[in-house]
Amino acid sequence: MKRWIKRIVICLIVLSILGAAAGWYFHGNHDEVLTFKTAKVTRGSVLVSISASGTLEPEEVIDVGAQIAGQIRTLGTDRDGQTVDFRSVVEAGAVLARIDDSVYQAELVEATAQLQQAEASLKGAQADLLQLQARHDQAQRDWQRAQKIGSSEALAQSSYDSYEAAYKIAVANIAVGEAAIAKAQAAISQAQAGLERAKRNLGYCTIVSPVDGVIIDRRVSIGQTVVAGLNAPSLFLIAKDLRRMQVWVAVNEADIARIHPKQAVTFTVDALPDETFHGEVIKVRLNASMTQNVVTYIVEIATDNDSGRLLPYLTANVQFEVDRRDDVFLVPAASLHWTPTIDQVAPEYRQDEQAPAAGQPPVDQPSADRATAGQPASDQTPVDQTADGGNHDLKPAILWIAQGRYVRPIAVLAGLSDGTVTQVIGEGLSEGLEVVTGTQSAAAAASQTDVSNPFTPKLPKPPGKGGPPPA
């Protein structure tokens, strides 16, 4: 009996040991081995830009309207002899449309008749004045004779008074005749003005192009009636020259101080996503607008369109070039912000039992002159001059290079950055040099580089390591 109890105890002990070993195997929390994530130093360009969106506009647009009311009777022809329509090329003076002129023809005839009537009235007034002048002369002579004779037995007093009155009436009639002539002349001037107005209105029935250009918009059709009120109705929209275009961009007030005339600009349009266009800032408008408490300014950009591929009113995605560096060493921005632990730094580079923090160079940090030694001329400028006249000082920083299980520092000067890559200057830099950007687990690194045969059988993974849960 005791022997069986002893065997049972031994079995329980063995099972406990096996269970502990299995638990350690399946549930053991082993420290993961970390590896370094690296990226290569490249040589290229870094650009700091301001992004905004805008609209392509023709450089000069003429809105052709109607100054009179009437019905569109016919449309004109373009340079190729085709009926005027969208995208028609027209020359200055070309007929675009004709408005029914029957009413204005009648007004012209009426104005002509009124002028002729006024001229006839003037001639009548002039003839009346001649008659009045003759009567005046007769009355004057009679009055002069009456004055010589005087009131006596030869000339009765009543006759004397009659000659005097007749003379005075003749003088007054001369004034009336002259006034009638002046009135007739004024009527002629009025009739002439009416005739000129009728002629102009008749001329307005023919709509002509004021410039050479391309019709962007045709807003009327044959038979349509246009009504000219306080504002002239718009009939055609003509772009003077589509070989020169403008981009009108709304720029936020926070960025407007970095925008200036002659600043280089690149932009794309959704219609041509694989093509990049270039332009130049020509004007920053001062009439800001506010939308939902956001203040924006309109910036005008000039661009060439000799190819004619850019169409009016396309949406442009604009990049204002604030600063740019070409042919410089570039590293990921993350590599300048990563800081290793003291255990990850190679022993010979450890100082005061702690690793240098990112951006804090070791004691032997080289000066700007040492950092630029042996670098291309484009990299040897200690201060970056920006397009808007500001400065970007080169700042001391540290890059870390993998050295087996450890990393070692390289002192550099960090320059222009677009948030993704940063310009760096320093000794020991070369294109293709791998710099540390962070750490990752060995399993993650292996999963990224696992190129084994997919048909090879895989051993099951223990629970907690990606395998099935324990039964």
Image (cartoon, helix red, strand yellow):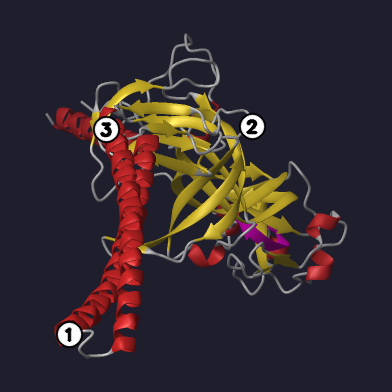
Q: Is residue 111 left or right of residue 282?
A: left
Distance in Å between CA atoms under marks 1 and 2: 104 Å
Q: Is residue 434 left or right of residue 205?
A: right
At horizontal 28% and vertical 48% (from top left) the residue drawn is: 231
Q: Residues within 10 Å of mark 1 (few under 14, many from 20)?
A: few
Q: Amino acid at mark 1?
A: Ala
Sequence order check, earlier mark of 3 and 1: 3
Quadrant assignment, res 172: bottom left
Sequence order check, earlier mark of 1 and 2: 1
Residue occupied by mark 1: 156
Q: Residues within 10 Å of mark 2 (few under 14, many from 20)?
A: few
Q: Amino acid at mark 2?
A: Asp
> Residue 106 bears which disc, if any?
3
Labels 1, 2: front one? 1
Q: Main secondary structure of the magenta part?
A: strand
At horizontal 35% and vertical 76% (from top left) the residue drawn is: 141
Q: Residues within 10 Å of mark 3 (few under 14, many from 20)?
A: few
> Disc 3 vs disc 2: Cβ atoms closer than 8 Å?
no
Residue occupied by mark 2: 306
Q: Is residue 361 left or right of residue 56?
A: right
Residue 415 lies within the magenta run: yes
Quadrant assignment, res 13: top left
Distance in Å between CA atoms under marks 3 and 2: 49 Å
> Disc 3 vs disc 1: Cβ atoms closer than 8 Å?
no
Q: Relative to 151, say whether 105 is above or below.
A: above
Is the N terminus in the top left, top right, bottom left or bottom right quadrant? top left
What SS does tag 3 mark? helix
Q: Relative to 33, say whether 348 is above or below.
A: below
Report the magenta residues as a range.
408-418
